[in-house]
Image (spheres, grey):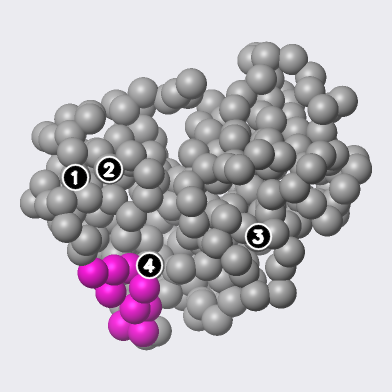
Amino acid sequence: MTVLSYDRRLAELGVQTGLLRSHAQGADLRVPVPTCPGWHLGQLLGHVGGAHHWAGSVVRSRTTEPVSEDLVNDVSAYTEADPGKLDAWLAEGAAELAEALRDAGPGTPVWSPGPEGTTDFWARRMLYETVVHRADACGALGVEFTLDEELAADAVEEWMGFGTVPEVLEPQPGLPPLLGPGRRLYFHGTGTRTPVRWLVDLTGQAVRCHPVAEDSAREAAVTVTAPVADLALLLYRRRTAADEGVEVRGDAGLLDLWLECAGFWLRA
């Protein structure tokens, strides 16, 4: 299933970037960001702006070859950034990315660092890159974070797409193998008109993640129930199983293992 349309994602990219900029307006850019250890707010904003500019260059060029991520990962330039220039950098990057994606249209082949090498990947990935880092900024600044349930459901679906790629099964130091008998996880995001339900099956030779129409808790070794926005942030490691509103039943160790292995791309 696809929760949001391509055009809706482009529109939301602008909305979410605008919210991020508003959170940072007048804030001390030296404030540490606890969910991004070692970064302060200015570096977080520079990272988001760099991601938008990077993705925009990929889409505009229609390249099918990997593009260096230095613009995204090198945040040293933002250690003493000018707030006004940084705000303009953010606004420019989001606008140029949305324009490039709109001009290219959905389904256009282009290199991507993840599944689905098309413009659809970039529209979704950059939207939730922005959403998750907005949550980081809110946490750093003590601002309440809220997220539309449709966006949260779409973010959960994105995570599940990453969860089926072969890299998830690569051995990790100090971690047991992910696959095994009886290893199923059931995720239930509450609060939407159509509840978000996903079953993650680790019992075969590959990971299978698929939406389910009915409660599948009986099939699972561990079940996770939370408001859908909190469920999305749990998957992106911005919430924990101990947080208020998140209910975990069964094998919590399996949940931790799944989040660590499926979050390989967050460690990059």
Residue 220 colored in magenta in the image: no
**First of labels 3, 4 by sequence position:** 4
Q: CA distance from mark 3 to mark 2?
A: 24 Å
Q: Which residues are magenta?
A: 68-78
Q: CA distance from mark 2 to mark 4?
A: 22 Å
- Residue furthest left as drawn: 61
Residue 70 colored in magenta in the image: yes
Numbered tag placed on residue 47 in the rendering:
4
Callout in the foreground (3, 4): 3
Q: CA distance from mark 3 to mark 4?
A: 23 Å
Q: Amino acid at mark 3?
A: Glu
CB within 8 Å, label 3 to label 1: no
Numbered tag placed on residue 110 in the rendering:
1
CB within 8 Å, label 3 to label 2: no
Q: Few, some or many C-alpha atoms within 10 Å of disc 3 (few <14, some 14-19, many ≥20)?
A: some
Callout in the foreground (2, 4): 2
Dot 2 corresponds to which residue? 117
**First of labels 3, 2 by sequence position:** 2
The kind of secondary structure element at disc 1 is loop
Q: Quadrant of residue 193?
A: top right
Which residue is depicted at the point 74% across and 15% down? 214
Q: Is residue 192 left or right of residue 62?
A: right
Q: How many marks?
A: 4
Dot 3 corresponds to which residue? 260
Q: Amino acid at mark 4?
A: His
The kind of secondary structure element at disc 3 is helix
